[in-house]
Image (cartoon, helix red, strand yellow):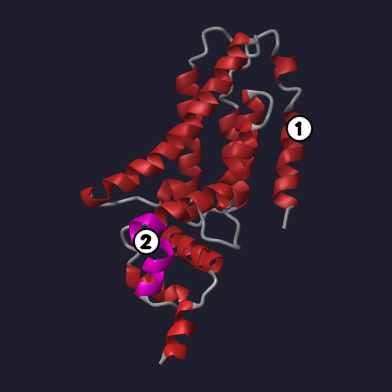
């Protein structure tokens, strides 16, 4: 009996976290039960509680893991020197990542709390905070480009950031509906046409585009 219990407790925590990530990614927070999690992980409920706390605590750790791995396209894009480069990089990386067949489609941070009941309002708030943080970072980069003369003075940074955040959220939904990368790339091209371009510094503002392309190629070629 003691040997059997030891075997049940002995599991790879990182591997279990990855399994939990895919369960939440596929089914969402509320639909994913402790029973389905432990079944997928190959462990019993006491082992899950001992390793991760409850389901809610596990989800928070899953989201943090996702943000550092599959969902890192946002942080990588924001490293671009201009808002235009950041937006293009983010959109193209999203098109590639949302449709990558090696993992569930779309974005966990966008779809993980869809259709949750009021009981999971804290989960919705947690994911909303991630999305709002990215949108705020985009707005700040746009503001910086306005100040630098790369964008017209009248540009509404908040509205522009919200527009591209909405495009990314829509791309995630489309990917979950089975739309492939090629069609999402067309969405990217269309969305980029909305970028303000009536400033004398337009040519200079787009000089970082090759750097954005390099970042995209490096990310999508990575194993």
Mark in the foreground, 1 or 2: 2
Q: Please determine whether, in this image, residue 34 is positioned above or below residue 4.
A: above
Residue 29 is left or right of residue 92, and the answer is: left
Q: Is residue 186 visible?
A: no
Residue at the spot 48% in from the left edge and 30% down from the top edge: 135
Camera-side residue: 48 or 175? 48
On the rendered image, what quadrant is the N terminus found in?
bottom left
Question: Helix, strand, or loop for circle 2?
Answer: loop
Instruction: Verify whether residue 49 appears in magenta.
Output: yes
Which residue occupies the foreground of this view, 222 or 209? Answer: 222
Question: Which residue range is magenta in the image?
Answer: 46-58
Q: Residue 145 appears at what percent x and percent y?
A: 62, 16
Q: Which mark is residue 55?
A: none
Q: Residues within 10 Å of mark 2 (few under 14, many from 20)?
A: few
47 inside magenta stretch: yes
Instruction: Report the magenta stretch's main SS.
Output: helix
Q: Residue at x 49, y 49 (%)?
A: 64
Residue sitting at x 34%, y 50%: 114
Give x and y (percent) for residue 78.
Answer: 61, 32
Tag 1: Cα neighbours inside 10 Å, few (<14), some, or many (≥20)? some
Left or right: 134 as drawn, with respect to 53? right
Q: How many marks?
A: 2
- Residue 198 visible in this rendered orientation of the protein: yes
Q: Mark 1 sits on what residue?
A: 211
Question: Which residue is painted at 56% across and 32% down in the image?
Answer: 191
The image position of residue 215, as x and y in percent, is 73, 39
Q: Quadrant of residue 103?
A: bottom right
* Quadrant of the snapshot with the C terminus: bottom right
Residue under label 2, please give it. Answer: 53
Disc with the residue nearer the chain's start (1 vs 2): 2
């Amino acid at each position: 009996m003691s040997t059997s219990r030891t075997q049940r407790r002995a599991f790879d925590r990182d591997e279990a976290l990855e399994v939990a990530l895919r369960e939440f990614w596929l089914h969402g927070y509320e639909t994913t039960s402790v029973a389905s999690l432990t079944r997928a992980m190959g462990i019993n409920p006491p082992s899950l509680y001992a390793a991760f706390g409850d389901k809610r605590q596990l989800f928070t750790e899953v989201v943090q893991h996702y943000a550092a791995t599959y969902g890192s396209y946002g942080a990588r894009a924001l490293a671009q020197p201009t808002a235009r480069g950041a937006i293009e990089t983010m959109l193209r990386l999203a098109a590639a990542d949302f449709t990558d067949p090696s993992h569930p489609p779309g974005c966990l941070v966008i779809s993980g709390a869809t259709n949750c009941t009021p009981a999971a309002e804290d989960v919705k708030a947690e994911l909303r905070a991630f999305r709002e943080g990215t949108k705020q970072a985009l707005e700040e980069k746009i503001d910086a480009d306005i100040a630098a003369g790369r964008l017209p003075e009248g540009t509404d940074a908040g509205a522009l950031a919200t527009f591209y955040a909405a495009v990314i959220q829509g791309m995630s939904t489309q990917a979950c509906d089975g739309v492939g990368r090629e069609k999402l790339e067309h969405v990217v091209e269309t969305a980029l046409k909305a970028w303000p371009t009536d400033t004398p510094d337009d040519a200079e503002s787009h000089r970082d585009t090759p750097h954005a392309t390099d970042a995209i190629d490096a990310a999508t070629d990575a194993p």
